[in-house]
Amino acid sequence: MVHEHRGEREMQVRMQSQPRAERFYQRQMKDRLLQPMVDLIQRQEMVFVATADADGNCDCSPRFGSAGFVLVVNDTTLAYPEYRGNGVYASLGNMLENPHAGLVFLDMFESTVGLHVNGRTSVHQPGELPVELAEYVEHHLVPLDTAVECWVVLRVDEAYIHCSKHVPLLQRREKPINWGTDDPREGRRLFSATGLREWLFD
């Protein structure tokens, strides 16, 4: 079911945009993933994950993987792996306090279309996957990388396309990436190579 948002409605009244917003809700806001949305997700190597804790303090972090690393379990369920990071667990910590999360996919190499998927999350250890995800992994022969610390499952509340007119069209360049590396030295080397270490800490 697509959720009503009180703040959205109030701003629509203030900005006198109710008819335009209503057309958007009726035509574009969905409570499940349509096939074009699924196709877009399965091509993506990046997703932005927006979360907030119980007090409303927000965080937005990107997640990366090979194309299709975000699994479309069914038309109302997504799942993606969490690899070793900086150990802060800002996104996962927020999810423990407040399961609501928003995912944004941007297809910057082909269609320049974006996709918003909002819903409720749950966090699972690799050996304790929910039944539908475990069955999907088994049926589709998804390799379970030992570097995955946990899986995030998102139940879709609403999904809608983001207009392509302001999304840049980028050109892909080759870059060697060791997806899910568990070597903390690799991250430090890449961070130092950009010069950001000196800029931030000197």
Image (cartoon, helix red, strand yellow):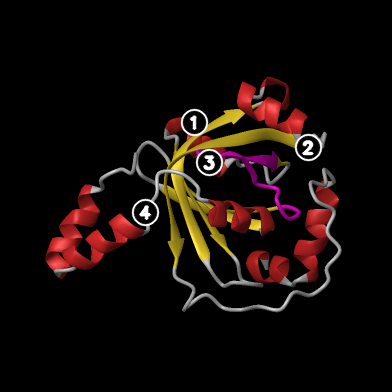
Q: Secondary structure at mark 4?
A: loop
Mark 4 in CB contact with mark 1 (< 8 angstroms)? no
Q: Quadrant of residue 106?
A: bottom right
Give the numbered dot on residue 96: 1
Residue 23: percent from left, percent from top: 26, 62
Give the numbered dot on residue 75: 3
Q: CA distance from mark 4 to mark 2?
A: 30 Å
Residue that carries the numbered disc 2 in the rendered image: 142
Above or below residue 172? Residue 150 is: above
Q: Secondary structure at mark 3?
A: loop
First in sequence, mark 4 or 2: give its number.
Answer: 4
Q: Quadrant of residue 146?
A: top right
Label 4 neighbourhood size at 10 Å, few (<14), some (14-19), many (20+)? some
Q: CA distance from mark 2 to mark 3?
A: 18 Å
Q: CA distance from mark 3 to mark 1?
A: 24 Å
First in sequence, mark 1 or 2: give its number.
Answer: 1
Give the numbered dot on residue 113: none
Q: Secondary structure at mark 1?
A: helix
Query: Which one is in front, 147 or 140?
Result: 140
Mark 2 in CB contact with mark 3 (< 8 angstroms)? no
User: Is residue 69 in the magenta section?
Assistant: yes
The structure residue drawn at horizontal position 85% and vertical position 53%, both measured from the top left corner, is: 178
Q: Nearer the viewer, mark 3 or mark 1?
A: 3
Q: Which residues are magenta?
A: 65-82
